[in-house]
Structure formats: structure tokens, C-alpha cells
Image (spheres, rainbow, N blue to C red):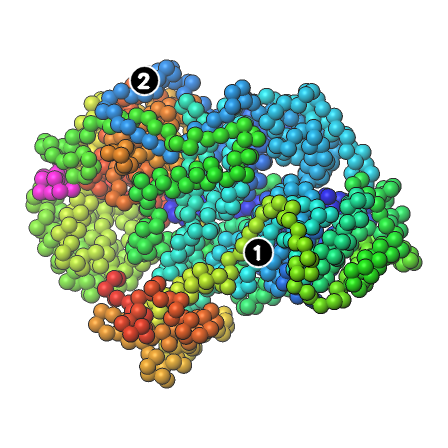
Amino acid sequence: MTGRARARARGRPPRQAAAAPMGGDPPVPLDLPGELSEPRRINVPPQPSGEPGGHGRLRGFESVLPERRPEGLRVSSGLQDLCLRDRGGRRRDYHDLGVNTRQAMVHVQESKTGLSGRMIKLTSNHYRLTSRPQWALYQYHVGYSPEMESRRLRSALLFQHEEHIGRTHAFDGSILFLPQKLRNRVTELFSRTRNGEDVKITVTLTNELPPTSPTCLHFYNIIFRRLLKMLNLQQIGRNYYNPGDPVSIPNHRLMVWPGFTSSILQYEESIMLCADVSHKVLRGETVLDVMHSLHSQVGEERFRDACAKELIGLIVLTKYNNRTYRIDDINWDSSPMGTFRKSDGTEISFLEYYKKQYNIDIGDPKQPVLISQLKKSRNVEGTVVLIPELCSLTGLTEKMRTDFNMMKDLAIHTRLPPEQRQREVGRLLNYIQRDDNVQKELGNWGLSFDYKSVAFTGRVVQGEKIFQSGNMVDYNPQFADWTKETRGVPLIRAVPMDNWLLIHTRRNHDVANTLIQSLYKVTPSMGIRMSRPIIIEVDDRTEAYLRVLQQRVTPDTNIVVCILSSSRKDKYDAIKKYLCTDCPIPSQCVLARTLSKPQTIMTVATKIALQMNCKMGGELWSVEIPLKQVMIVGIDCYHDTVTGRQSVAGFVSSLNQTMTRWFSRCVVQSRGQELVDGIKACLQTALRNWFKWNKCLPSRIFVYRDGVGDGQLNTLVNYEVPQFLDCLKSIGTDYSPRLTVIVVKKRVGARFFAEVGGGLKNPPPGTIVDTVVTRPEWYDFFVVSHTVKNGCVTPTHYNVIYDGSQLKPDHLQRLTYKLCHMYYNWSGVIRVPAPCQYAHKLAFLVGQSIHKEPNLMLSDRLYYL
Amino acid sequence: MEKNFQEEEFARVTKFTPPLYKQRYQFVKDLVEKYKPKKVADLGCADCRLLWMLKFCSCIEVLAGLDISARVMKEKMHMLSPLPFDYLQPSERSLTVTLHHGSVAHKDPCMLGFDLVTCIELIEHLEESELKKFPEVVFGFMAPSIVVISTPNSEFNPLLPGVVLHRHPNHKFEWNQAQFQSWALEAARCYDYSVEFTGVGHPPKGMENVGFCTQIGVFLRKYPQTGGSVQYEKPTEAVYKTVFKAVYPSLKDEKYLQNAVVSEVIFIAQNIKHRLMSKHEEYDDDPERKSEFQPSVDCFSDCLGKLVVDKTMEPFVNGNEVYIPLATIFSFPKVNQLCGTFEKLCKLIAGKVTLSSDGSAVVFNTERE
């Protein structure tokens, strides 16, 4: 996921309340052009701060139990509403509760834990939630006769009877949760509205929930959010931040708010809070400031384009309410002087509106306005108009991410080493423990936390042996890196460079020569035979590069190397597009700047030589893979968040026993299409190619599926896996390979710490955790495969959702770990199995630059590295 | 005290536009605009909606709410918290919002010294004993310059469908115009206030004699301000419970001011440095750059342009180091406005920004990039 996508996932535009009980009339702009002008509800967001999206609609008893989830895992809609109002987002089950995959896998029903490796003492950022003995949550349905529409009215009428229902309660308008049982199953209460209408309120017990029920888990999370609010933390997106203690980085006009992510879930043995440190990057500039500085940077002609490029997709905060919005468009034809129609029918300009409603003077009446689309949710849709001057930016842009200095300055504050990270999380627990109101709230519900994080043992499996041309590479598994050790060792398969092109501009003439000289020095020891390239000088224009490619590239060309003078994306895109589709030849683009430092040129040249070799179908090293007749598949997705039009799935599958060669395809699909249909076709061709290489079909297939969003697990289990099985069945009646599907997740909240000499350290590579902090309903485990220089290592979560292999957990874990050693663009261990990273690279290249499926002629090489 | 939604219901029936509760709040807002009080208290603040509206009034520096129901206040009190934006760009004025749980029949020193006290749809909820103590507490003890009291006008009730006795079952009474006015005049006389009567919610044509739907009394204190509690020889104990307090970030607070100044100084200095390092990119040469987008877009060049006259203020490069005189930075309107004096600027950035040995210029090392 790109940073932008991440930002989008966190800060999705909030729902506009259909009947906002407070705060301004939702106005309708009148002066929008074209596509926006059909009848619609267009809302400016003058919602008050902290105003949860109201939902004042009538809900009868029937609709209280929607058929949203599989039987037995039903969470009442009322409760979901409660938690979503807190979150201000869409309905979504972020924790994939209720997807129970382990029950179908007989071989791991007893135990899913491995045994091999040495034991290691670990702690994590999980804290047990405890409740008093015989604790239960009582769920009541509250009915009104006659029906009352407004949620606030319903609450008010009910809470007139606090002497009956008690002071501690959670109520969403129709479902009431109480920590204790009322005397009768059905309680009738009588209230009178101010209009003198008598209302009968019927409170009926519908459920007695044990602490582990899914509804209760939702409920804990709601209560926990209440606590965070009580601690005066500010909600931004999904997480909570402490504004009282910001770190400002004036060099880049950034401000970092420390905060927390938290979730309460049922883990292996107990319900636990998983809390982690999170940092929110906020920018001290308004959108208008950014526009001004862009204007002075790029000038008039490119100004609008630059604004669109820089701003669309970003998440903004406003000056007057507590919401986040995504910028979807910029309307240059409108301005704050434009008018809109308020809900009472009167027309008002934005200038007047903000003055009247919020006493805000808009300084620049000529600025354009920003448009934010509201996600289709409930029955409200439309767009929100925002004034640039009143919007402040959050998060980082792609441009900022590539700014090395900025990222370095940020990392000081956000990359916390293990000990410090655990201390920061401990602070949250401390706040909770010390705050009287929080303790009272917890006490009223009969809940409390273990304020010490859980401790357990993990296992560190043996380091993997790396083989290169029959030699075992002697490296230290602690460092998870063999760059030094493999230097000067011949590759498994070196592809000669007899016929290759080097294209550069006049300015980079010297750089090009340096590169050739350096390559001459490094390639012999690798076993790569290299002739002098055909060197072509071009003008620094995209068309010039393309013309040369069209004229000089022949089917015999091994590879094309282009030295680019800037990281301008259009040139790179054009070259890649041509050489991946129209004229399928591997290519290597290098920035002139990378080659300009004499002290690093040999390292760079080595890296380039290896990369080019892989792109041409070479092989670098291997690990021992004891399983025979195995095909490994890796899948990852790329979503175009800027235009929101395309999604690309990269599909990579192994071709040989040693997993050194990979077949690849990808699926480009526009919005609304199902990804899985394309993936099915990929699997078919993959099997055909495997057959070509091995003269038989694989007897086991392992699919490592990355790019699965929170809450999508259900779809995967119920739709994608059956499609895989279907596809295998269609190959032939006598063919029934064993399929295993593993969901790979890099973004997890869990952090592990090794206790070393009284302090906390990152766990060593090869650490496997499959107890205590895993989920009982899944066959899942964590692997720490890589190392990090700064900060905390993030374990990768593997969830085996389908397993026909019958392999022991030990073996599956080892296979997974082995595959993390096989990514050829990095001579070390990476965070995910190599096929996932390859699939990611492929999807990214296609999504960013090529936008259609590359030529299949290239499909047996790692041309996308 | 669920006034708002009750009123909403009601407004729908009789079609006051804007709804009556909004008209009442607007009335208070207009009053605030007129008298510019610094300290405002809302008694019976319920769901804090009026307070939320008032927090946007730039004259107010202290806002307090008081209600008998902590639950109702707590439900929406977080609306009164500062927004992320407030931290990002702290405002000029200071603002503290406090919510108290307690009764208007009790005196608490935290209610002393206010300029405006509002009691919107409050008194009709009071028990007889509380109502009796009310004038003494509000006019006698709190003694603000202005008091606003609104209450239903029972003469209007026959025009409201469905109203039998009172508009709300929790109302202990509803007064006609004469009743309210005699009570108000008595209170005003007793505590040396003047009172004017008005209201919101006009009666239908031809029925003007029933008066406004909501009757309002605006009380102005006739004697000048005497220092708060001094007037009361026996200062009372605190009886209210504070349920919420929010101090808004403000440039009046040295910490926020320093942050703002330091980040502005570094930002400007870096910008000047960039310009200096990339002079060849014909930056300042093109007066046509400024477009219809906004005439003041390039205030940067403007500022720098003016400065070139004075040679001592020109930034310069010396070896690996770029020197940007503080005087240059101080001449930027935003810095100027934030600091006021050059001395203040020097004081605020001391130790936070790398300066030349004589302290007259910001120094950057160009090696870093």
C-alpha cells in the first residue's frame, strides 16, 4: 500500500448526518459546473466538533438484527453503529472477527504450534483485560410506543428512569447494554414528552453475553474509546493522539503528535488490549499556503496541474470541526464568494456563512475551493466543499517521502527503539490506571486491565544456509544479510551481456563511462560475460529516448540501460511502457546522480549488475527446499488512489524446485470488477508453465496472499479460495494437488521484545510466535524474518486460511521463513516471502507506469525488479 | 433539561424559521457582539450547544457552563475541546472553557467576575425553593454586568398544538408576560439592575397581544464593577464540581508563541537560503509571474525586494555557511506581528535557532544537502 493509500484508509471521509441534530444547515452550492449540477445533496461541512454522525431514523425490532454476518457470529447492528459513530467511518469489521477458518483444518485443531528452534523469552504490547467472575453483559432491546424518531429523544426518555436502569449504560437508540441484570426480563417504563404525549418504553432482555462473545468484543472497544476520550486524547482517523505534547519540526513545517492505536480482541487464551505507539504527522500549513508555494515554484501554466498532483488524495483537517476529509478535486471556477443554498432555502455565500457560523474571516476571497466526495453510505451522498484557507494538511505526500532529510528528521521522533516504544505504550496504561474517572468507568462495567504486558516464549529457528554455485555462504544469521559474504562469488546462473544498449544524455557522458568501467570490474567475479555496450547519446527528452529505442532495440538485445538525469516520472514511465509491452526487452534505468559519487560507485555497480542479471533470467543464490513438486504463488495488489480507477494484482509463481525462477502475470482491473476472476486465469497459465519446466504438474501449491485489507478476510475465504479450488479441478479429473492459502499481513499492531540482560531488544531474525498473541479461531503465526537498524522490528502475520497440505505447523513456518531469503533485489532476509515482494514490485510497476499487462514474453524473468 | 430537541419537535409543528431554539441562541450571540463580554457563563447549559456557538466569538476569553445534570453535559462536552487545528495554528486570544456540575441555588466563587450570565429556558425548570434563591445567587452573588433570562410565555401556549398544561413535563411553571415582568422587575429593583423585555418567536398576525413565544429579559447592572468577591464579605466555599476544563492553545502562552516564532523564522530563513542557492533560476526577475490567482501570492519576493536597499540586511554566503540577518527575517510581516519588537524576537529564538557568533543572523550549513 502506498502512503497515500494508507492515509486514505485511515482518514476516510466521514458520513454526513442525514438529520444532523446540531450544527448548521447543510448548504448546497449552486455554482458548481457540469457533472455536479444535477439534483443532489451537496454539503459543506459546518458540523460541530466531535459531532458524531447522527442517525435519527426509526429502527424497528426486525431491522435490529440484519443479516450481515454468518449465523452464530451476528453482531447486532445497533452495536456496530455505536462503535462506528465513535469512529466516524464506514461499517467495517476491521478485525475480521467471526471468520473462523481453523475449525475446518483437522490437523491443527489440537495444536497449531511448532516445536523446533531454541526458546526465547518475549514480551509484547498486549495487556490482559480482566472482568470479575461470572461477568456478563446484558443486552436489552428498547421499544417505544408510540414510536419515537429522534435518537436523542429516545435516550432522553429512557434516561429519565436512571433509578431503574442504573447510571452505567451504553445505548444507541434501540439497543441498551447494562453491566447488571434488571429484575424482570421485560420492564415497562412510562415517560411523557413535552407535547404531553405519553410514551411507553419497553425494555426487553434479548441476550446475556459472556465476556468472550463477539458482541462483547465490539463493546470493549467502544468502552475503550470512551476511556481515551476521557483522557482528553484527540481522535484523528482511527487512532487517538495527544495534542498536549507535540513535537514540532520547524525545518519542514511539520508537527508530530504522539498517539496510540488500540484494539481489544480475543487472543489465544484471553481477551487482550493490543496498544501501540502511533504518530500523526500534521503540517503547519493550510492548503492555501501550499498552493501559494506551489505557485511560486512552478509558475502560472503548470500551477493547476501541480496543485492537482500535490493535493488530490490528501487528507485535511478543518479549522472549525473535528473531521477529516479527503481532497478529491479542486474547483477553480468557484471561490468563497460563491453561494450555496442552506437547508432552510436561503442562499448564502461561503464568506458570509463562515463569518456567521464560526466567526471566521476568510482572508482570500478569490481562492478556489476543494471538493471532497462523500462515500456512498446510508442514504446520504454528495460532495463537501472546503475552503483551502480553512484546511490544514495531514500526513506526508509522496514527494515528502522521497525527501531523505525530511524522513531522517522525522525518524528521530517516530522510530522508537524497543525500550522506548514499550515505555511510551506503558504511559498510556499509566494514564488509564491513574485517571479516577477512567477507573470509575471501568469499575462500573466490572472491567480492569493487567497493567503489565504479557510475557511468553517464542522460538528462534535455525538460520538458513545460503548456497551460491554449490558453495555454502558463511554469513551471520543474526544480521540476516550476506552482501559482503557473496561478493566475488560466482552466481548460480549468470546471463552474458553480449549485446546491450546504454542510452544517456550528453551531460551524463562521463557518468556513463564510469558505469561501464565499474561493470567491467565487478562482473567477471560473478561469472557474467560482458561485452562493450552500444552507447547512444540522446537529447534529454522523452521522445528522443523512445525514438532511439524504436530504432536500435532488436530481438537480440539482452538489456537496455538508460541513464536518466532526473527522477521525472514521465520519462521513466514511457521507457518502461515501451519495453514492457510493445517491445519486450529487459531494461534498467539508473539515475545519473546515483553514479556520481566515486566512493559508492563499486557498490552501486555491483548492485546494478546483479539486478540486470536477474532481469535477464539469471539466478543468484538458493536455500534448501526439502519439499518436492511444489509450486509457490505470491499475490499482491496495487490500488491507484489518486485517480481511484485501477487496481492491479501482481501474480508470481515459482518455476523450479530451487525457487530461483519465477513466472509472473498481472491483472489490471477497473473499478467494480472482481479481482479473483483474473487471478484464476493467472493460476491456470502458471500451472501450464510449471508443467513446461518440470514435465509434470505440482502436487502441492502454496499461495501467499498479500494485499488483503482489514475486514476482507471473509471475502477471501468464501470467494477466492473456492475459485482457486475450482481452477485446480478444471485442470483435469485425475489432478488433485494439495492447496494451501496463507494471508500475509505486514501492517500489524503487535510488537515483540526480547528480554536481554534486563533490557528490551528486538527479537532476532527467525523468531516465530504461535501462542498467546495469536487468534484461537485461526491457524496463524508471526515470523520476525528481517532486522532493522533503527526502531522496532514489525513481525509479519501469517494466517493459513486453507490448508490441504497437511504439513506440520513447524514445516509450514520453516518454508515461509526460507522464502523470505529468496528476494534477489536484496542480499538478505526480507519481511515477507520473496514471491509476495516480487508480486508487489510487479503490481507497482504496472500500476504506476505501464497501466496494462506487460508482454508475456517477459513472464519467466524478473524484469520488474 | 432536554430543551433543544423538545423545541425542535415543537418548532416543526408551529414552523418557526429558524427554529425557536436557534433564534434564542442567535439572540445571545447578537448580545455578545454588541457588548463584547470577555467572560460569559451559561447557567443550565445542558448539552453545551450555546457554549459551543459562543466559543467562536473572538471577544470571549472565559466560558463557563453550569448544569444540574452532569450526564447531559458529558454527552457532548468534547465538542468544547480544542481542535487539532487550534494546536496547529494557535490563535491570538486565550480561551478557557470550564463546565461545572451544580445548582443555580448554590453560590460558588468560580462564578464570580463574569461579564455576561445567560439563563436560557432555565428558570421554569426550578423548584419553588430554588427559584427563590435564584435572584440572590445570580444578581446578588455573581453580579455580572449583564444577565439574560428567557422563559416560555404561557399566553402563547394556546397557539401551540398539543400543549395542555406546560410545554415540557419537567417545567415547574410557565408564566404569562405580567408574571415574568413583575418577577424580573422585582429582582432588578432589589439588586440594582435595569431590565428590558423582549423575546423571540413572533405571534401570528392579529394576535400580537399574546406576545413572543419565548419572553426574554435583559438585565444591565446599574452600579459599576466592584472587584468580584470583595463585595461579598464572606467568600463562599466551592460547591460545584468541575466536570470539564479545556485551555485553548494561544499565542498569549509563551510556549506556543515561541513555537510559532521559531518555526516561522526557520521557514523564512530556509526559503531565503533556497533562493540564494538557486539564483540562476531567474526567480525574482519576472514581475509577470503574479497572476490572477492572487495578487499577494509572492509576498516573499516583495519583501525581499524592498530589503535590497539596505545592504546590511542582505543575506549572504560565506564558505559553507549561509547568513540570513535577523533584521531581514524580522521585516517579514508575520514575524513582525508575532514578536512586536526585535528584542522579543531575539529572546524567543535564543537557543532554538543557530545564530552567527554576534547573534545578528541565522546560519545554515549548506553541506547537509
The one of A295 and B38 positioned closer to us in this rendering: B38
Residue at (19, 62) in percent of width and height: A508
User: Is residue A486 magenta-colored?
Assistant: yes
Q: x%, y% of residue A543?
A: 30, 60
Q: x%, y% of residue A583?
A: 27, 48
Q: Which mark is residue B96?
A: 1
Q: Amino acid at mark 1?
A: Thr
Q: Which residues are magenta?
A: A483-494
Relative to A110, is B113 on the left or the right? Answer: right
Q: Which quadrant would the C terminus of chain A be assigned to in this image?
A: top left
Element carrying mark 2 = loop
> Which mark's residue is nearer the viewer, 1 or 2?
1
Classify 10 Å Cα crowding around label 2: few (below 14), some (14-19), many (20 and above): some
What chain is tagged by disc 2?
A
Q: Is A544 placed above or below B174 here?
A: below
Name the residue that disc number 2 marks.
Answer: A806
Relative to A436, is A667 on the left or the right? Answer: left
Q: Which quadrant would the N terminus of chain A be assigned to in this image?
A: top left
The one of A746 and A154 positioned closer to us in this rendering: A154
